[in-house]
Image (cartoon, helix red, strand yellow):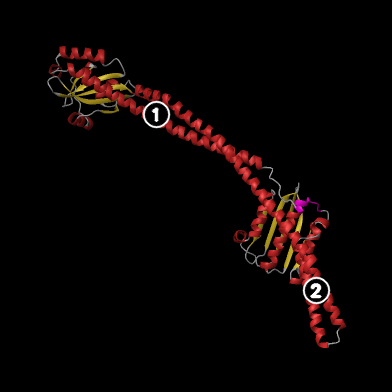
């Protein structure tokens, strides 16, 4: 009896898994690429600022300091003109747009803007620390400060300052101002050079992972098919074993017990010993009762009416034992119910397991089995008024219920249990009948 039907959404599920893998990979790739771009841009700006420091150091120590003498500090026009000529010819021909030389007292001893020469402004803490301890510092210039009033037409400037000495050894502070757009442009150049390699490498990695995702999806689908095949073989083996056991019981123990009952009954009628009549009659009754119980067991193990007379007759035979055990049983199945044999077999297996649990655990006084069709799906329900249970705990602990759930879900159906302690229980399944 075949009870498995591969889900029609199996291939679609595999494709959706591949799509999810690709989309998640792209999202991660984009996120990593954005982080990488941000890091590259920051690194580019850092490198550009470092280049500005090196350029200012070269300009201050290599160009300005050699022509910086005490005459410049005293403000002599000829010395200032000679220094200004060197600065304009060798320093202000690139990204540097302004140069200032400060004395330790905060007086501007030279600037390429003559209006600032001789003006005094307080040095900031950073400038004084650099002047005292040495080093090179860079920061975005505060154009609102009075000493920067002539530079406000620039949108943004990067100022670099470092200590230098005149030819006589007097310490002064050299300060250069560079267009920040040059720094940003340098950072963008670094980004443009490295970003394609980073993004391209990430995309290549994603393309490398795509076949892996497809292979994994195929393996998952193959694993699902193998699982279905194993379950199918288990069911087929179970059916064969049920048939063998039913045949052996029917042809062996049932026939032997039936013969024994007839023999004991005949002996009881033929004996002239009053003391032997009772035990012989009781033995015949016990043998007949055992035959009835074994035949009921045969119906449970392998219902003979399922294939021949249909689901209703097989369930009726199964329910026949309930009144004798004190449980009122009812069966509600339309006379014209027609479902394929695999679905019919699956519904019977579900009902059989549910009814077995009712007898073993429910302590019910009544049970109802119903079945029908609903929008192309065959459904079956088993309801009892027993003591109920926690569906979550019972489903985990009952191997039979777990197996039934797997069978129903593998057939593309739904398996539901509704119950609560003291409130009875209802098991309902719905399976496509195509």
Report x, y in % for residue 345. 75, 55
Left or right: 269, with 59 as reference point: right
| Element on which disc 2 rests | helix
- In the depicted structure, whether residue 267 falls above or below residue 64: below
Viewer-proximal residue, 176 or 58? Answer: 58
Viewer-proximal residue, 137 or 258? Answer: 258
User: Which corner quadrant of the image does residue 394 belong to?
Assistant: bottom right
Left or right: 141, with 22 as reference point: left
Report x, y in % for residue 37. 43, 30
Residue drawn 66% across the image and 50% down it: 230
Taking the image as drawn, is residue 318 in sight? no
- In the depicted structure, whether residue 189 falls above or below residue 409: above
State the residue position of label 2.
288
> Bounds of the magenta span?
337-344
- In the depicted structure, whether residue 123 falls above or below residue 320: above
| Element on which disc 1 rests | helix
Report x, y in % for residue 413. 69, 50
Give me the C-alpha separation between circle 1 and circle 2. Answer: 94 Å
Residue drawn 65% across the image and 40% down it: 11
The earlier-in-sequence mark between 1 and 2 is: 1
Taking the magenta stretch, the answer to whether it contains residue 398 is no
State the residue position of label 1.
41
């Amino acid at each position: 009896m075949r009870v498995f039907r591969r889900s029609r959404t199996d291939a679609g599920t595999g494709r959706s898994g591949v799509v999810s893998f690709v989309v998640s990979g792209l999202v991660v790739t984009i996120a990593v690429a954005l982080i990488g771009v941000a890091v590259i841009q920051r690194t580019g700006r850092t490198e550009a600022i470092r280049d500005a420091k090196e350029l200012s150091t070269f300009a201050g120590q290599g160009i300005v300091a050699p022509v910086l003498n005490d005459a410049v500090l005293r403000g002599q026009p000829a010395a200032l003109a000679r220094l200004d000529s060197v600065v304009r010819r060798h320093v202000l021909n690139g990204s540097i747009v302004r140069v200032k030389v400060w004395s330790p007292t905060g007086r501007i001893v030279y600037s390429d803007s003559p209006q600032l020469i001789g003006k005094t402004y307080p040095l900031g803490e950073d400038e004084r620390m650099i002047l005292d301890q040495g080093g090179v510092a860079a920061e975005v210039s505060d154009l609102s400060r009075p000493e920067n009033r002539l530079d406000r037409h620039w949108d943004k400037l990067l100022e670099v300052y470092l200590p230098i000495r005149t030819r006589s050894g007097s310490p002064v502070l050299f300060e250069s101002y560079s267009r920040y757009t040059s720094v940003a442009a340098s950072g963008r150049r670094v980004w443009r050079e490295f970003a394609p390699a980073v993004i391209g490498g990430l995309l290549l990695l994603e393309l490398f992972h795509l076949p892996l995702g497809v292979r994994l999806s195929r393996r998952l689908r193959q694993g699902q098919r193998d699982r279905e095949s194993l379950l199918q073989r288990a069911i087929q083996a179970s059916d064969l074993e049920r048939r063998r056991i039913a045949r052996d019981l029917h042809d062996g123990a049932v026939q032997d017990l039936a013969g024994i009952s007839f023999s004991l009954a005949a002996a009881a009628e033929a004996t002239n010993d009053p003391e032997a009549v009772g035990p012989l009659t009781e033995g015949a009754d016990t043998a007949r009762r055992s035959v009835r119980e074994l035949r009921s067991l045969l119906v449970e193990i392998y219902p003979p009416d399922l294939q021949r007379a249909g689901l209703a007759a097989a369930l009726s035979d199964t329910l026949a034992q309930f009144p004798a055990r004190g449980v009122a049983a009812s069966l509600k199945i339309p006379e014209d119910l027609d479902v394929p044999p695999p679905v019919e077999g699956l519904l019977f297996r579900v009902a059989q397991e549910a009814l077995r649990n009712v007898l073993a655990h429910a302590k019910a006084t009544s049970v109802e089995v119903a079945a029908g069709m609903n929008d192309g799906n065959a459904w079956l329900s088993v309801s009892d008024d027993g003591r109920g249970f926690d569906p979550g705990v019972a489903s985990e602990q009952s191997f039979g219920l777990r197996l039934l759930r797997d069978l129903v879900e593998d057939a593309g159906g739904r398996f539901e249990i509704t119950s609560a302690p003291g409130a009875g229980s209802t098991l309902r399944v719905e399976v496509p009948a195509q």
